[in-house]
Image (cartoon, rainbow, N blue to C red):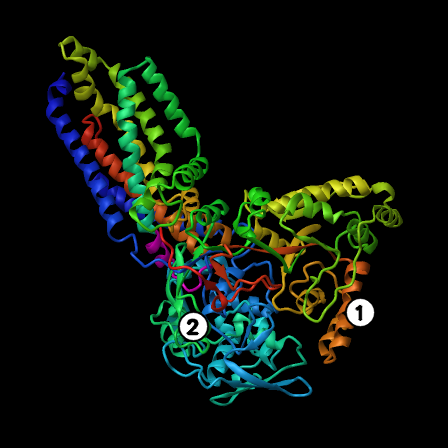
């Protein structure tokens, strides 16, 4: 019931987000068709604006955008205006949905792989660090985790390309051509998150291990390994799970930096460029996609929470 | 402790599920990676790092250079530009007659000209394509390239509804007659311009806006479109039915859209790209090194970097102030310290080497005279001169970073030579264009790339009504000179009129101050590739390119 309500609530939320985004993208100066070169006559500009209905008031454009607009033709007959969300103003021969459909699989692949990468690296390292709390292994891992969080993809990406692509010639420097093309982008994207996951895992472990039931279990004579694995891990992973929702949303919707460094045809490049290009329908479309993914993943994360931790009850 | 007792079963179940979830995720990602995402295509014979992702491949829609480089290979017009000299030469029209008054052109379409899908190319294809580009519903940005044709502008503005009134008619399948408004010395150059190229009527009528996704896509140029994947690549293959197919060598060509400067360089260094078309694709920081490579080829081309004054704002409404600021600039310093790629400093707007034209000299570096002018205007030693703002588009990196460096140099030179102060105002590029259009600036950076090889593409833009004026400069004398020059059939007189106009523009009125000419730049190995010639339009027709080795081995 609770989850049904959450899903029902998501729809008005998405509509509100689309409205806000629709207005916000129009606030910065300059329009999609402002170029270094002005067209030869003001009529050309008028034709372009009329074609994409940019000459109409924003509320009217919005109604047209969501497909809730009817207009009268020359004969006085009413016609439903087709929804305007699907025409890119930058890539005029492409529909926004097509653009998203071409970029999404690539961003999904890279994002999922990066997610697995950061979990596979972060979870064991965080667990190990917590078990060696205060010793040199813990401090070294902490330092590494901190480094991975602090050094941005902007630095890691080109660095990886330089070492593995140019110097060692082990991996392709860019482009999306074969499975090995994914290796460097996944590492560049995942390394930051693996640091975050490791730190969250370590903190989670440490705070769980201070609980009374752990002391009780220890008093009952359970070995330290049993304690960590059986009783600690289950609760310690909760912060990581909470974080994995927004993290996965971030990863799945693409990264501008990693995609542009490795020349990948994903969604991240589209989002940033659509803002610069004032490609309004494209930006709003991507914002909605991101919002939907985020809402969906948060829902899943909450469900996993309820299932893993009997103390949590929604209702 | 109910929790402790119930834990083991729940925990192991949770852990198992968690593990299972991760395995499923990895599996799913792996499958996705291996199946749908990669395209097993043959390697291209030639891979070109081309610049931004093309906005479109529709000749009527495109505005940018990176699009034109692809589109000119797909769709051709009556003429095409010679790869070496960029002089228009016969293409789909093999000959033409020009009436003595230069108002009527009669073109004869090649009898062996066919679309890549086999249908003959006729004069009607030209009528259709040109009317389509002019049609208000097409919303073509570059429709102005056709405004030299009789009634074309009125048709585009919706003042005339009947396309038959526009001065382009098919006399028969092989003959096209074009009537112009006034003599247009560069009309044959325009005929090679993409907006005037022909597009396939049936496909467009069938598929509408999505006609470029149709396969096979009929093309009229040396190449056919194989695939176009956004932010990935555009792939072309040789069109065996092109009228000049025997002189086209390269079979399969990939154009890569490259978003980041280091990526283009990485691709070139690892042999994944054979050609980097221009300097904007490479990191300026490394340009000192790159230009020493034997693979670098630089040349002057038809582009000028300049800045605009808003002549409607004080103190820039005074021509003496504008002249003073122009004369306080040491342009050598800009090209030596900032641009570094062999750009030529200039005091005139129209580049040297423009066809049928020798530009006059403008205001050189003369700080003494500059100070005198500023004092005359009421600001001796820069006293009381209001602090003003210099607007430019900011960039985090790449070639556009140059604008900021130039602004800093100008700031220093004006401070040292004139004792005046300016602030740097960095804005996003669309904001810059919007502000220029609305005259919401004081001084701002600009540049202009010639559309065709003629002085008019530079000088025409500062007439009072031109949309590209963007300075507030309105001058009847200047308008008259440009008008007279364009009416002139006599080449020598035409040149003289243009020279007079330019002299007036850059030494008297000075609404703009030219700084340097762009350097064209190509990166390719001459041992492997030939047929890319340095020329003033930076145009390198694909059909002229030759490669001397097999497909890329990776």
Choose top left, top right, bottom left or bottom right for residue B178.
Answer: bottom right
Whether residue A73 sits left or right of residue B403 in the image: it is: left
Residue under the point 44% across and 72% down: B222
- Does the rendering let one see residue A230? yes
Tell me which corner region of the image, top left, top right, bottom left or bottom right, holds residue B537. Answer: bottom right
Position of A130 with respect to B351 (left or right) is left
Asked whether residue A92 is drawn in magenta, I would say yes
State whether residue B456 is above or below residue B300: below
Q: Which residue is label 1 attached to? A: B477
Q: Judge by depth and name the residue closer to the eye, A211 or A237.
A: A237
Please state the horizontal and vertical placement of residue B390, each as a whole percent of the image: 69, 46
The vertical placement of A170 against B93, above or below, is above
> Which residue is labeled 2 in the image?
A72
The answer to whether residue A314 is seen in the rendering is no
Side of A310 where A260 appears, left or right:
right
Q: Identify the secondary structure beneath mark 1.
A: helix
Whether discs 2 and 1 lie on one chain: the answer is: no
Q: Looking at the picture, tell me which residue is in the foreground, B503 or B541.
A: B541
The segment highlighted magenta reads A90-103
| Residue A192 position within the rendered picture, expressed as x and y whole percent measured from the top left | 38, 32
Q: Is residue B501 magenta?
A: no
Is mark 2 in CB contact (under 8 Å) with mark 1?
A: no
Quadrant for the C terminus of chain A, please: top left
Quadrant into which the N terminus of chain A falls: top left
Q: Is B204 displayed left or right of B493 in the figure?
A: left
Subunit of label 1: B
């Amino acid at each position: 019931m609770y989850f049904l309500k959450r899903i029902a609530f998501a729809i008005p939320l998405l509509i509100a987000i689309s409205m806000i985004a629709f207005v916000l993208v129009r606030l910065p100066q300059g329009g999609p068709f402002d170029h270094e070169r002005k067209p030869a006559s003001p009529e050309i500009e008028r034709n372009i604006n009329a074609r994409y209905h940019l000459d109409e008031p924003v509320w009217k454009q919005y109604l047209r955008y969501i497909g809730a607009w009817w207009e009268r033709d020359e004969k006085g007959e009413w016609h439903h205006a087709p929804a305007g969300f699907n025409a890119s103003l930058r890539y005029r021969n492409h529909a926004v949905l097509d653009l998203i459909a071409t970029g999404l699989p690539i961003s999904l692949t890279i994002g999922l792989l990066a997610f697995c990468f950061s979990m596979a690296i972060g979870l064991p390292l965080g667990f190990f660090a917590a078990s060696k709390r205060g010793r040199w292994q813990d401090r070294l891992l902490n330092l590494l985790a901190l480094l991975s969080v602090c050094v941005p993809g902007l630095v890691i990406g080109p660095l990886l390309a330089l070492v593995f692509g140019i110097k060692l010639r082990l991996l392709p420097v860019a482009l999306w051509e074969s499975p090995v093309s994914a290796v460097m982008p996944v590492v560049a994207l995942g390394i930051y998150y693996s640091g975050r996951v490791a730190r969250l895992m370590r903190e989670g472990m440490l705070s769980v291990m201070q609980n009374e039931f752990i002391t009780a279990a220890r008093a009952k004579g359970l070995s330290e390994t049993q304690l960590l694995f059986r009783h600690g891990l289950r609760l310690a992973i909760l912060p990581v799970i909470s974080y994995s929702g927004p993290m996965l949303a971030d990863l799945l919707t693409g990264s501008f930096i990693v995609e542009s460094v490795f020349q990948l045809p994903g969604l991240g490049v589209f989002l940033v460029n659509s803002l610069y290009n004032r490609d309004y329908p494209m930006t709003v479309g991507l914002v909605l996609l991101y919002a939907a993914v985020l809402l969906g993943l948060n829902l899943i994360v909450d469900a996993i929470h309820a299932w893993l931790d009997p103390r949590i009850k929604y209702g | 402790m109910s929790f402790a007792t119930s834990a083991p079963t729940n925990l192991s179940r949770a852990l198992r599920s968690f593990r299972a979830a991760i395995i499923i995720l990895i599996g799913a990602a792996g499958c996705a990676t291996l199946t749908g995402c990669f395209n097993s295509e043959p390697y291209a014979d030639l891979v070109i790092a081309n610049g931004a992702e093309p906005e479109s491949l529709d000749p009527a829609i495109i505005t940018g250079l990176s699009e034109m480089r692809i589109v000119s290979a797909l769709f051709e017009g009556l003429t095409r530009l010679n790869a070496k000299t960029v002089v228009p030469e016969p293409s789909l029209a093999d000959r033409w007659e020009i009436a003595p008054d230069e108002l009527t052109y009669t073109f004869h379409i090649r009898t062996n000209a066919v679309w890549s899908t086999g249908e003959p190319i006729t004069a009607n294809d030209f009528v259709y394509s040109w009317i389509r580009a002019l049609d208000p519903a097409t919303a073509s940005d570059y429709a102005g390239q056709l405004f030299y044709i009789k009634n074309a502008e009125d048709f585009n503005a919706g003042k005339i509804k009947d396309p038959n009134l526009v001065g382009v008619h098919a006399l028969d399948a092989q003959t096209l007659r074009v009537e112009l408004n006034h003599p247009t010395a560069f009309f044959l150059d325009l005929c090679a311009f993409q907006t005037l190229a022909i597009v396939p009527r049936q496909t467009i009528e069938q598929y509408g806006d999505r006609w470029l996704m149709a396969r096979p896509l009929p093309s009229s140029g040396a190449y056919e479109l194989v695939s176009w994947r956004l932010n990935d690549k555009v792939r072309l293959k040789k069109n065996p039915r092109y009228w000049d197919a025997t002189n086209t060598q390269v079979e399969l060509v990939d154009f890569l859209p490259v978003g980041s400067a280091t990526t283009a360089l990485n691709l070139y260094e690892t042999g994944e790209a054979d050609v980097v078309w221009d300097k904007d694709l490479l990191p300026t920081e490394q340009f000192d090194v790159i230009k020493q490579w034997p693979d670098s080829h630089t040349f002057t081309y038809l582009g000028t970097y300049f800045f605009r004054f808003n002549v409607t704002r004080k103190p820039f409404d005074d021509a003496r102030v504008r002249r003073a600021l122009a004369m306080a600039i040491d342009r050598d310093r800009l090209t030596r310290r900032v641009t570094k790629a062999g750009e030529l400093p200039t005091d005139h707007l129209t580049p040297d080497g423009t066809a049928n034209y020798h530009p006059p000299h403008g205001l050189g570096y003369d700080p003494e005279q500059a100070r005198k002018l500023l004092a005359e205007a009421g600001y001796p030693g820069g006293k009381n001169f209001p602090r003003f703002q210099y607007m430019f588009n900011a960039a985090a990196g790449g070639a556009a970073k140059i604008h900021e460096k130039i602004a800093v140099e100008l700031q220093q030179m004006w401070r040292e030579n004139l004792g005046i102060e300016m602030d740097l105002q960095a804005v996003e590029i669309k904001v810059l264009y919007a502000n220029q259009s609305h005259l919401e600036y004081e001084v701002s950076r600009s540049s202009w790339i010639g559309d065709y090889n003629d002085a008019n593409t530079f000088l025409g833009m500062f007439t009072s009504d031109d949309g590209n004026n963007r300075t507030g400069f309105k001058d009847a004398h200047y308008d008259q000179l440009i008008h007279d020059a364009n009416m002139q059939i006599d080449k020598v007189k035409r040149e003289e009129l243009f020279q007079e106009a330019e002299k007036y523009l850059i030494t008297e009125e000075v609404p703009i101050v030219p700084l340097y000419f762009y350097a064209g730049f190509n990166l390719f190995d001459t041992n492997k590739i030939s047929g890319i010639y340095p020329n003033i339009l930076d145009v390198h027709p694909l059909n002229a390119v030759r490669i001397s080795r097999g497909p890329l081995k990776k």
